[in-house]
Image (cartoon, coloured by chain):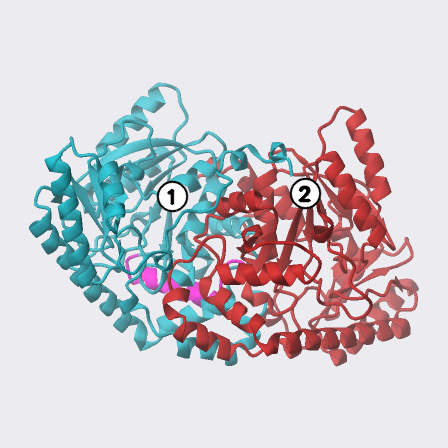
Chain colours: A cyan, B red
Amino acid sequence: MNPSILARRALALSAGPAGRHFPFEFDPEVVLFDSGFASPAVLPDLTHFAQEALSRHRDEVLQYAPSQGHPELRQWLAEYMNEDGCNLSAAQVLVVNGAKNGLDLICRLLLEEGDTIVVTAPMYFTAIPIFRGHGAQFMEIGQDGEGLRVDVLEEALRRREQAGRPAPKFIYTVPDFHNPTGVTLSRARRVALVELAARRGIAVVEDNPYRRVRFEGEALPTLKSLDRGGWVLHVGTFSKLIAPGLRIGWVAADADVVSRLRQMKADGGTNPFVQRLVLEFCRSPDFAAHVRRVQTVYREHRDCMLAALRQELPQASVDVPAGGYYLWLEFDPRVDGDALARDAAAAGVNLIAGSRFFAGMGDVPRNHLRLSFSYASPAQIEAGVARLGRIVRQQEVR
Amino acid sequence: MNPSILARRALALSAGPAGRHFPFEFDPEVVLFDSGFASPAVLPDLTHFAQEALSRHRDEVLQYAPSQGHPELRQWLAEYMNEDGCNLSAAQVLVVNGAKNGLDLICRLLLEEGDTIVVTAPMYFTAIPIFRGHGAQFMEIGQDGEGLRVDVLEEALRRREQAGRPAPKFIYTVPDFHNPTGVTLSRARRVALVELAARRGIAVVEDNPYRRVRFEGEALPTLKSLDRGGWVLHVGTFSKLIAPGLRIGWVAADADVVSRLRQMKADGGTNPFVQRLVLEFCRSPDFAAHVRRVQTVYREHRDCMLAALRQELPQASVDVPAGGYYLWLEFDPRVDGDALARDAAAAGVNLIAGSRFFAGMGDVPRNHLRLSFSYASPAQIEAGVARLGRIVRQQEVR
């Protein structure tokens, strides 16, 4: 085939194979702090639920299924979110193939080539190519200890309006245990953000994969629970709470928005077998016990990594996240995080340089690292942080 | 949310709920000839394979997985197609969430708003909104007993070139047991089509869900097996051969095309648990036995429906397909298939009016019906065709 027939966006992509990323692609000695894999210690035993789904529900799970998702799972998800402050019906829930599929569909719903969206700086970096693939331009807004600077956003929107430019289409944010910073958006900012978006006629995409992976403290209201005008599209997933391999997420939004998203979800519906399996697991007593175990194990991982960092890397500053999968390390501005990440990989510690988490419309700071504490065991965390400490000390010597 | 912020294509979609379509939404008395559900009699027992996947391979199937698909499944699929005349490596295979997901990704790869594609008239109607959703214009080419009229296509392309218009981006066709007509593209036409496409620099999208659902006769070479210049993108699926609910399909194409499709597949990869389950089933002796059973059962269904039609609807002409799921009934040009389909539904026989299978750029003939023989049992087929015969006779009396 002659590449000249490719669409412009496809032509811009690399034609080569994917790089290494998965645990099975690395020597077991390599410590993986780079990605949000689940701890093997918390992967649940789903054999019983699969057995049930494939025997008792065989005629359901092996046939085509409704593209909006299993009616009972949508009902369960609506109730799950209603217990968390929302007021949803099953008609307001779309089951998707993981949160990324939800984000991709929301881009199809809202974006024309060249439209602007608001993102945090830094942001969840896997979303960057998804948004770019739909032709998005980025308006980056910084964060502080209370999360997204809603005041800065408000001022930026005002300036944009004064310049006669169209409003951004949506504001994308991870309000709970933000990826990569771990920060949780404060209650006052949540209220202000939802109010600002409605007033300005901008949708809010609330990406909330870590909502139940909370280690301490009271939950703050989801943006969706504060939404009165239907401006918030909530993206949920079981990837971080049950298992990434399930590829089951959901979008909660107004029924008419869900109806349009459903029609754009041109894949014949999310796997009905796995939907039934998840539904039976979530309805079982195993689910609550599993959530407690996830919280306990990842709290231990976080505490272990924090203790190791205080010991081995006192020169890095880190805020303590109340949940989620990640620590965000800030170094002296002269430290080159990109070089650090390369040296660490060469020494058998995989992590991601902070610079990769910026959509890159402005200056990109290079003095951060993101460390995931989800996959590595406590012993691996200690070994990996010790290796990282040696590398940083060597850099300082140079 | 104010709908004015929706993308143009989303705004064009219906904001209402989906219509009824699934067996569980109908009274058991209703005979379903309308859709390609599997016969409940051929749904395989996959419990053993799920058990294996979730226990022995738990760390693999519950984690994130490579977005191109499981390496062993891709290898198996390459060999499966190589036994069928191709010459593929695993790098040339992308695992997708069913064939529709593959078609959607191919549109992302190739289409800009307003691009033209070649389709058959009639065509697989579920593909129409997928193609339209990417802004496609349709060039419709008719078929005869040997399938797509490649000579007519060649002449249309020549006229288009003379008019100074750009070539279509791809030719979409179902060469084996075409949906809805059941016709199989002849060997000479296959050779001519692949040669014409390469000469003109047009991709060929070979959608081949029914390939192994052959009841008699020798298989003809796939378009992919005839492809020398990498112009053919083959879309395969297990939906029609194993079970629709698996949502596992694949695209076979050049490695650089597969690499770009992979990057546009922004869903975190196809479900790794179901990929492993399918891999283990396909490697087991159960697979060959299952394929034989599918062929036997659907041959019986086809023969049962043909016999009932000869008895009850001698006024309809129908070609005998050598495989697949459908019969395509042609009536006297004065018969209104749309009205027939409505009357049939009212009498408890669901089928699809032929007019819905045309992309609708030219005149749409209304004197056809598509009857699926896959889902209904032989007893239901006899009862449904008898009901349909009474309805047609009543229309004739009016």
Q: For this view, does B81 lie left or right of residue A35? A: right
**A83 or B78, which is in the foreground?**
B78
The spot of residue B28 in percent (x, y) is: 65, 77
Q: Residue at x 15, y 58 (%)?
A: A382
Label placed on residue B231: 2
Answer yes or no: is residue A103 visible. Answer: yes
Is B27 drawn above or below residue A342 in the view shown?
A: below
Q: CA distance from mark 1 to mark 2?
A: 31 Å
Q: Are marks 1 and 2 on the same chain?
A: no
Is A302 drawn above or below residue A8 in the view shown?
A: below
Report the quarter where the C terminus of chain B lies: bottom right
Indicate whether residue B19 is drawn in magenta: no
Mark 2, secondary structure of its residue: loop
Q: For this view, does B325 lie left or right of residue A223? A: right
Label placed on residue A127: 1
State which region is magenta. A67-85
Amino acid on which the number 1 mark rests in the picture: Ala
Report the quarter where the N terminus of chain B lies: top left
The spot of residue B198 in percent (x, y) is: 73, 39
**A250 or A357, which is in the foreground?**
A357
Is B316 drawn above or below residue A181 in the view shown?
A: below
Mark 1, secondary structure of its residue: helix
Q: Residue at x 44, y 72 (%)?
A: B53
**A169 or B45, which is in the foreground?**
B45
Q: Main secondary structure of the magenta part?
A: helix
Whether label 1 touches label 2, CB < 8 Å: no
Q: Residues within 10 Å of mark 1 (few under 14, many from 20)?
A: some
**Chain ID for label 1?**
A
Q: Quadrant of residue A185?
A: top left
